[in-house]
Amino acid sequence: MATSDPDKLIAKADKLTKLSMTRWNADWKNATVLYEQAAIAYRLARKHDKAKDAFEKASKGQEMLSSYPGTLTIESALGMLQNIWESAAALAKEVGNWNEVSDFYRRASELYIQCGRSQPASDALAKGARALEDALPDEAIQLYTDACAVLEDDGKEQMAFDLYRAATSVYVKLEKYTDAATFLLRWALAADKCNASHSQCKAYLSAIIVYLYAHDFQQAEKCYNDCCQVEAFLNSDQNRAATRLLSAYTDGDVEEIKRAAQSSIISSLDHTIIKLARKLPTGDVTAFKRGATEQQEDLLDEDDLT
């Protein structure tokens, strides 16, 4: 480049986009190159706000170029724009502007959605989610959810399996166990749609374990009964593992619960779920023991003075 001074690059680029008596058309092609060069120079100089502004100007330049017939193909414009937004997102991450990280990755995703390209659109959202898992976990979950929805809407559920896994992991870290189980059931439904019965059954078993870890035996049992309505699960190894685990709870047998949680079927689940299973039971299981409810009701009847 003729100069490495980013301020001069910006000034020169701005001049190229303004009409005058001697310039009847804006030169967005050369201006965009200068904006990108300035953004990189600002970033190296750690002038993050100016770098962000330069990236945004470069993005506008690419949008203008894509609107001029014959200037750039849509594919080229999209590729350049996506790179610009991802560079801006990386910069925002460096300085901790977390809301901008989400916004920039969403913009990159929207460009692909406009052209019907669901996979890269979902990938952009997933990149944003991974960048935000620690700083803004709730926003990360929303990005993962949206990334799944993009693929689901395009009938590409199988491409979203890693996203379901990642979102579940964040839910567990946040101790939002009901939400984690719900997302696992969503994964199971997606797996069913693409005939991935093994993944479907693993997701069902994982949801049951999450409920047990939350010490919600009633919901775990309800989930199990609902899952047994699905033939694929009813005849699966995952069903047998769930049956053994729930039976140990209804027997009030803590040692059997621990042994069941160590089974090879449970050990083949995702690492996040395995960690939860290894900690079972998480509370007193005597209340779940077979006959405990009836005994409690009998005691209440004996105390009834009416």
Image: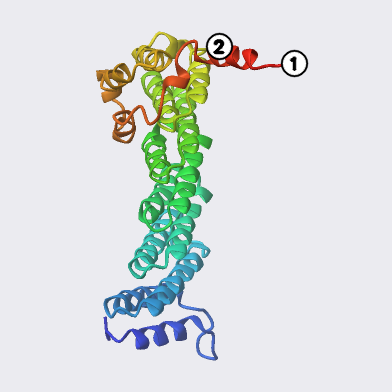
State how far apart marks 2 and 1 are (Cα).
Answer: 20 Å
Q: Residue furthest right?
A: 306
Looking at the image, is mark 2 or mark 1 nearer the viewer? 1
Residue 20 placement: quadrant: bottom right
Residue 93 placement: quadrant: bottom left
* In the image, residue 74 above or below residue 152: below
Which three-letter amino acid code belongs to the residue tagged 2? Glu
* Coordinates of residue 254 in the picture (x, y in percent): 33, 20
Mark 2 neighbour class, 10 Å CA radius: few under 14, some 14 to 19, many 20 or more: few
Which one is earlier in the sequence, the residue at label 2 or at label 1? 2
Q: Is residue 71 visible?
A: no
* Coordinates of residue 198 in the picture (x, y in percent): 36, 19
Mark 1 neighbour class, 10 Å CA radius: few under 14, some 14 to 19, many 20 or more: few
Which residue is label 2 attached to?
294
User: Which quarter of the figure is the N terminus placed in?
Assistant: bottom left
* Coordinates of residue 55 in the picture (x, y in percent): 41, 71
Q: Secondary structure at mark 1?
A: loop
Residue at image location 42% in from the left, 27% down from the top: 212
Tell me, for residue 246, which label it has, or none. Answer: none
Front position in the image: 207 or 145: 207
* In the image, residue 173 above or below residue 54: above
Q: Secondary structure at mark 2?
A: helix
Front position in the image: 24 or 286: 286
Which residue is label 1 attached to?
306
Which three-letter amino acid code belongs to the residue tagged 1? Thr
Left or right, 130 with respect to 56, comes to: left
